[in-house]
Amino acid sequence: SVQAKGYSLGAAADGIQLVRSGGLWPLSVAMALEDERAPLLGEAAGRGGNMIETIEQQRRWWSIRVMYLTMFLSSISFSIVMTSIWPYLHKIDETADASFLGWIIASYSLGQMVASPFFGLWSNYRPGREPLLVSISVSVAASCLYSYVHVPTSHNKYYMLLARTLLGIGAGNVAVVRSYVAEATSLLERTSAMANISAFQALGFILGPVFQACFTMIGEKGVTLAAVDLQVNMYTAPALLGALLGILNIILIIAKFREHRVDDLGRLCKSINTNYEDSEDLVQDSQGSIDQVAVVATNILFFVILFIFAIFETIATPLTMDMYAWTRTQAVFYNGIILAAVGVESVIVFLVVKILSKKTGERALLFGGLLIIFVGFFILLPWGKELPKIQWADLKNSSVPNLLHWMYYPHLQVTTTKPPSNHTMDPTGCPVEQSWCLYTPVIYLAQYLTSDILIGLGYPLGHVMSYTLYSKILGPKPQGVYMGWLTASGSGARTLGPIFVSQIYTHLGPRWAFGLICGLVILTTVILGAVYRRLIPFSVRYGLIHE
């Protein structure tokens, strides 16, 4: 221990500050405080003092950085083939239709939802390296299988479904990554560390499609390696790169990753997974139970935030095709640019939030994120005075929708798209099978772009703040299982969100779809207000740190 020279630890606005008083503090506490003053990605070890402590601090931060990279590579493995799944599926199995594509997309989230609690439980009782190595190995095997799904003579689509499911199971290690970083950081370090995880995750989602675009230069035919019966083309090369990155990740974990746990004050903790024989400042887990109401509430908040963003991603293409008469190619291209811009915006928010959280606290930022999301979807409601362009062929062949429109909405003007000069092209505009096209006003492009900007700002705020608060509520307790359930709730949201919006949007239109989302955000905000005082760190709740 060292003399803290008249200071003790206190908390303010969900953060920690030094409060004037006398007292003795362990060396590791002083080191943790000094570490927080340095940039998170900079020198992490304490300066001076016990050399063993300094080495352990350095190893701890190396392990945390390995977890950043693991999250980044996991995101790339998911996104690197997303833009080419449909043409690859159609090429290997002509019996596959768009509905089966939906199952392939959902299989990743379902696999992750099932695997996350299992890997989280595993990391609670065994060294975290074990579930990490096993899960990454599963991901490598899944990427290799994806590269070979064209080889069987039949049922190829089911092999692709299996490959994506296994990749989702491998992605269950997100729970291990989050729980490790939460357990290896003090309260002072936690928000910055969690923001960095989200930033690396978002960066992986952005760069994955970029790599895929680069591989299009190989072409569909590519190169055939007869010795291993492998076709290296624009569809399989991204998956092979994902497998290679997974192997490099395994090597890095074996070489650099070590088990570390600290309590909320930054003191090294005794754990089944750690062994610091030479350290004198180890502490036992803090006594006290976890606030289960706060845990459940935070899971709900996290679910809703990811549910809403999954809806936003899913609805972008059909909405722009219906409202602006874009072709499929235009919708994919323009929305790809928009989503990439939103991704860059999110990375910036993740970095800025580390500074803002020290001034306002996590709860206020979470509330602000929900408010911004609400405004984004409220703006997206149809406010125009004209209808979207109707597909010319549908309007020509149907007089009943015309009669319905003129009876109930005579003040809105109907326009149609021009018939395509090439009849092999798909018609553009809002299809009349969606009856709401005849009475729902158009959503202007300025509305759509403004909404994209706001949602791209509100989502990362809510996302990182919700699971940062979650980790602080859990405190120094083993977090593997709890992080597993949080990851599972997020995976469930990404599975149910597209199903919800596709049904509501197709049958009732954007007014109902976005109106219900606005209502859901209001309800979520009410839940946040009801549990606001309970969303506090474990150590504050039990008086170990004064708020």
Image: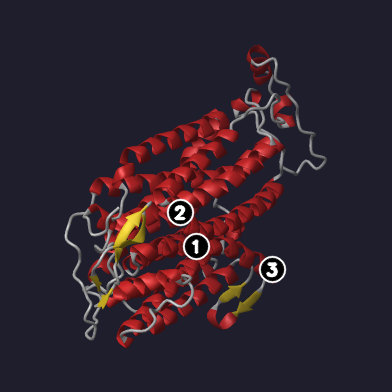
Q: Amino acid at mark 2?
A: Lys
Which of these two is toward me, 92 or 196?
A: 196
Q: Amino acid at mark 3?
A: Gly
Q: Quadrant of residue 307?
A: top left
Name the residue: 78% across, 41% down. 423
One can see residue 98 in this view: no
Q: Residue 378, position in %: x, y?
A: 55, 33
Q: Which mark is residue 342?
A: none
Q: Nearer the viewer, mark 3 or mark 1?
A: 1
The residue where tag 2 is placed is 359
Q: Residue 89, position in %: x, y?
A: 56, 58
Task: Tell me which numbered mark, 3 or 2, is placed earlier along the sequence.
Answer: 3
Which of these two is toward me, 94 or 181?
A: 181
The residue where tag 1 is placed is 201
Up/down of 434 relative to 330, above or below: above
Name the residue: 72% across, 31% down. 389
Q: Residue 368, position in %: x, y?
A: 48, 44
Which of these two is toward me, 71 or 414?
A: 71
Q: Residue 353, position in %: x, y?
A: 49, 56
Up/down of 452 relative to 64, above or below: above
Q: Quadrant of residue 264?
A: bottom left
Name the residue: 38% across, 79% down. 46
Q: Amino acid at mark 1?
A: Gln
Cα distance in 3D space between marks 2 and 1: 25 Å
Q: Nearer the viewer, mark 3 or mark 2?
A: 2
Cα distance in 3D space between marks 3 and 1: 28 Å
Up/down of 266 relative to 93, above or below: below
The residue where tag 3 is placed is 219
| Quadrant of the frame with the N terminus | bottom left
Mark 2 secondary-structure assignment: helix
